[in-house]
Amino acid sequence: MTNICIIGAGVSGLLLVLLLAETSVELNTVTIVDPYFDGGDLIRKWSSVMSNTPWSVTVSNIEKYLPSVKIPKWALELPSDKPTPVSTIVKLIRECAKPVLEKVNRVHGVVESANWNSSESVWSITVRKEQATTTIQSKSLCFTYGSKPKELDISVPCIPLEVALDPKRLQLYVESHHKVIVFGTRHSGVYVLKNLIDASVKSIIGVYNGSTPFIWARDGEYDGIKLEAASIADDIVVNKYPELQLCPMSKFSTILREVRTADWVVYAIGFEPSHSIKVSIDDVPIIHNFEYELNGKLLHCPSAWGFGIAYPSQAPDGIHWDVGVSSFLEHIHRQIPSIISIIYPLQ
């Protein structure tokens, strides 16, 4: 029996382990399950993507919420006022989490299902390890796995978003005479457009939803683009790149006409949770599209929480959702007492 089972050793899972290490929780009663333990999708898929926050924000939040963690020397020597690739952030968190991971129970494998037994108040988590399966019994359960990019049902070959955001890999897909349609012009969409331009693609169409192709943080927009992405957008709106056309989603006839002759599409329209785990209560399956409270508690699952990109915290304005390492750290930190209360009810 374990007290806390964490599904996913990506950034949010590692941050959860680090925050638990700051408490009185005995780490040998914590189990974390992941097939790789490499830092998750941020390092496997999005390592070349530039963060949209200065490096100092990441470091200062780690120092604030994880006072026992020693920041490595190389991290303190990076320019504090500039953003970094997300791979740098993952590297820092992995290094910080390494000594803690040596104290918890690590299970290499893929979680297939989780069932809550109400009579015993315990979760049974089934994990596949190669051709075998094992079962973990836990008092509480935390989902900290990632999400996958949303897609549209369009019959045109698709360049995966993770490829479109990697200039070197993108070169393996596109040629200069191709026509590429990019759906979405927020943070990731801006970088995709620039990567296509740099790849010498001569016909690029950026499709946006709303009245304007870009919204900037400098204009007071909570989730507006900033830093390098904002500079790229500035160049686009002054027609620095004639090979790029912008088209609102409302112009359906134009989009349909362009799609007919497109070689590729790229979807940069957001993410959705990767619901591959079968979840049940007393062996009765439930839809794994959990509603959750602002504290991360899953409404339909006893003693279960969700953190990270699949379960983001709501922004202060009550409209947007906060997604990012610093936001994850702050959000999880606030919920640690509620998780511990399951293990130590009197604390």
Image (cartoon, rainbow, N blue to C red):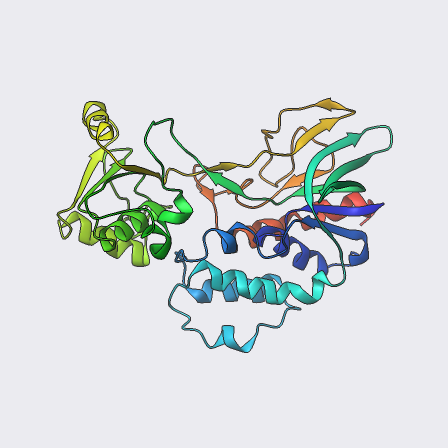
- In percent of the image, x 70 and y 31: which residue is there? 301
Most foreground residue, 56 or 259? 259
Most foreground residue, 137 or 66? 137
- Image position, residue 153 (x, y; %): 38, 26
Which quadrant of the view contains residue 120?
A: top right
Q: In this rendering, does residue 265 appear at all? A: yes
Which quadrant of the view contains residue 310?
A: top right
Taking the image as shown, residue 239 lies to the left or right of residue 135, namely left
- Image position, residue 148 (x, y; %): 49, 39
Which quadrant of the view contains residue 260?
A: top left
- Image position, residue 321 (x, y; %): 47, 41
Q: In this rendering, does residue 26 appear at all? A: no
Task: Please determine whether, in this image, residue 101 is positioned above or below residue 265.
Answer: below
Most foreground residue, 140 or 130? 130
- Image position, residue 53 (x, y; %): 41, 59
The tally of labels here is: 0
- In percent of the image, x 62 and y 66: which residue is there? 96
Image quarter where the N terminus lies is: top right
